[in-house]
Amino acid sequence: MTSQSAVEPILTQKDGGVAVLTLNRPEALNALNHPLMDRLEAALKSFAKDDSVRCLILTGGPKVFAAGADIKEMENAAAKDMAADPHLSRWDMLGKFPKPVIAAVAGYALGGGCELALACDLIIASETAVFGQPEILIGVIPGAGGTVRLAERLGKARAMELILTGRRVNAKEALALGLVNRVVPPEGLLEEAMALAQNVASMPPLAARAAKASLLHALNAGQNDALAFERRLFYDLFDTQDQKEGMKAFVEKRKPRWTGK
Ligand code: CAA
């Protein structure tokens, strides 16, 4: 990690099969600077390898999710500096994380903060959440996947409007737009995210990974390719113990016991 701060910019904790990553730079509204994203990358790498972790929650805590990439870091950069910097690839790393990821969003999720939530698979929003891609208001465009992932969730017209105007949307509108999965009262945010994460973590992990891989692949592939990919993953699961156990348990009318094998 390259942080010069004594404070950890990402806090991690594990609860059963769920790992919680909390962005922790409150003095800058969790602006996503290099030390923070370095630490996020390291945590993602570690949790990807850790078989006891079956689902991630990414949150900024009860006040703010993240107010974007750090403008003060980028202010004086030239195009070649930005292009040579792997910073923005961390958003893609999150988007490609092999296990399901849930964003628990309270307060601002703007710019790169919104893009971080969009890179997650599911988004639970507090009633206080505010989403937006305000990059155009500071002379740029979303650079961490916003034009791609917002359009994926909202469709072209609605994404175009938000990106061209930088307009912010509150949690209620975000739900109506299909940007988030559900909206909950502020005090229930982490509890709701944890309940969903525990539910996902209780699923057979190889099937959960295959489901995510197939859905992500489908978003980038033609239909024939996507259907073939899905079928291959479906067939592959028939070589797992969890498939045998799941179907046997159904026939024997009992709960399955997953081994992750
Ligand atoms: N980068 C760096 N610092 C930021 C920041 C950001 N994105 N957002 C907030 N901060 C800092 C502020 O500079 C301020 O620090 P100081 O106290 O040292 O001045 C502190 O956080 C608190 O912020 P405000 O005083 O501005 O708080 P506010 O409540 O008045 O306003 C806000 C909150 C509306 C979120 C406002 O801070 C804001 O507009 N932030 C920038 C949002 C933005 O444009 N995000 C996009 C960034 S570019 C990007 O993300 C590119 C990409 O696609 C990857």
Image (spheres, grey):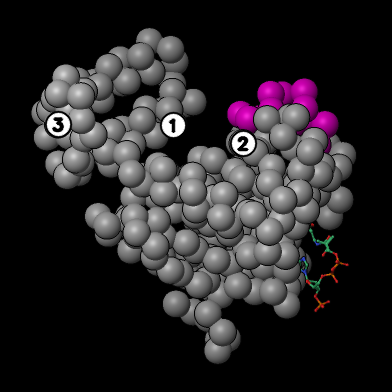
Q: Which secondary structure, mark 3? A: helix
Mark 3: C-beta under 8 Å from nearest atom of ligand 1:
no
User: Quarter-wise, where is residue 261 in the image?
Assistant: top left
| Kind of residue sitting beneath label 1 | Leu
| Kind of residue sitting beneath label 3 | Glu
Q: Earlier in the sequence, mark 2 or mark 1?
A: 2
Note whether 256 is above or below 226 in the view shown: below
Relative placement, left or right, of 214 versus 89 is left
Q: What is the span of residues highlighted in magenta in the rendered image?
A: 151-162
Residue 26 seen: yes
- What x and y, as percent, mark residue 177? 74, 29
Numbered circle sitting on residue 23? none
Q: Earlier in the sequence, mark 3 or mark 2?
A: 2
- What x and y, as percent, mark residue 216? 44, 31
Instruction: Give the residue at x 54% y 50%.
Output: 193
Numbered circle sitting on residue 245? 3
- Between the C-alphas of marks 3 and 2, the distance is 31 Å
User: Quarter-wise, where is residue 221 in the image?
Assistant: top left
Numbered circle sitting on residue 181? 2
Numbered circle sitting on residue 216? 1
Q: Is residue 53 magenta?
A: no
